[in-house]
Image (tube, grey):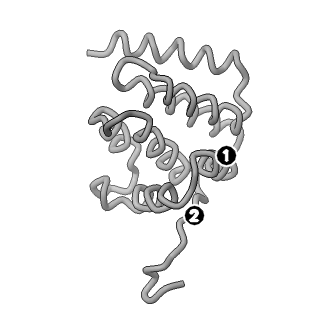
Amino acid sequence: MGLFGLGKKAEINSPESALMLAGYTMLFTDDSIEEDKLLMLEKINTSGKELSKSPHYKNAKKFFDKHSFEECAEAIADALLEEEQETVFVNLVDFALADGDINEAERTLLALYSSYFDIDEDVFDKALEVMFIKHRMSV
């Protein structure tokens, strides 16, 4: 460990950290970071601090900066119970639809998560259907 904890290694070892990292990875599926996705990260921020100062957000950013999407998905899956994985997956579909559509990069990332989370095709399709309805009706 570095001086005063500055070299502290980022770890994904709680459901909160896992959800934040999962959401954080969705920021990088578009050409630019969408405001809607940042707002969704703010909603899942449980630290009581502004997003950029949240320990879960800072940890997610640090972890993502040093790991591939695949390594992130594996770390997230390892940090979650099976039922938590399903919940996080549905939240990821919600993130992907923040702008009202799912682009190819988002679909690829969702497929990656579904394989690490062992999400079957039925759950995948149901999550998409429900979130499409949610976003269609959002005001």
Q: Quadrant of residue 133?
A: top left
Identify which amino acid the numbered label 1 is placed on. Ala
Q: Nearer the viewer, residue 138 or 62?
A: 62
Q: Residue at x 39, y 33 (%)?
A: 30
In the figure, 51 relative to 123: above or below? below
Q: Residue 136: image x %, image y %?
A: 36, 10
Residue 3 place in picture, x, y as percent: 45, 89
Residue at far bottom of view: 3
For mark 1, does the 10 Å Cα neighbourhood hold few (<14), some (14 to 19), or many (20 or more) residues?
many
Question: Which of the numbered marks, if any, corresponds to residue 41?
Answer: none
Tell me: 109 left or right of 62. right
- Horizontal and vertical percent position of residue 72: 59, 50
- Vertical order, 92 against 76 (above or below): above
Reading the image, the residue beneath label 1 is: 77
Quadrant where the C terminus is found in the figure: top left
* Foreground pick, 105 / 100: 105
Which label was assigned to residue 11? Answer: 2
Provide residue 56's location: percent of width, then percent of height: 44, 57
At horizontal 69% and vertical 44% (from top left) the residue drawn is 81
Q: Residue at x 38, y 16 (%)?
A: 135
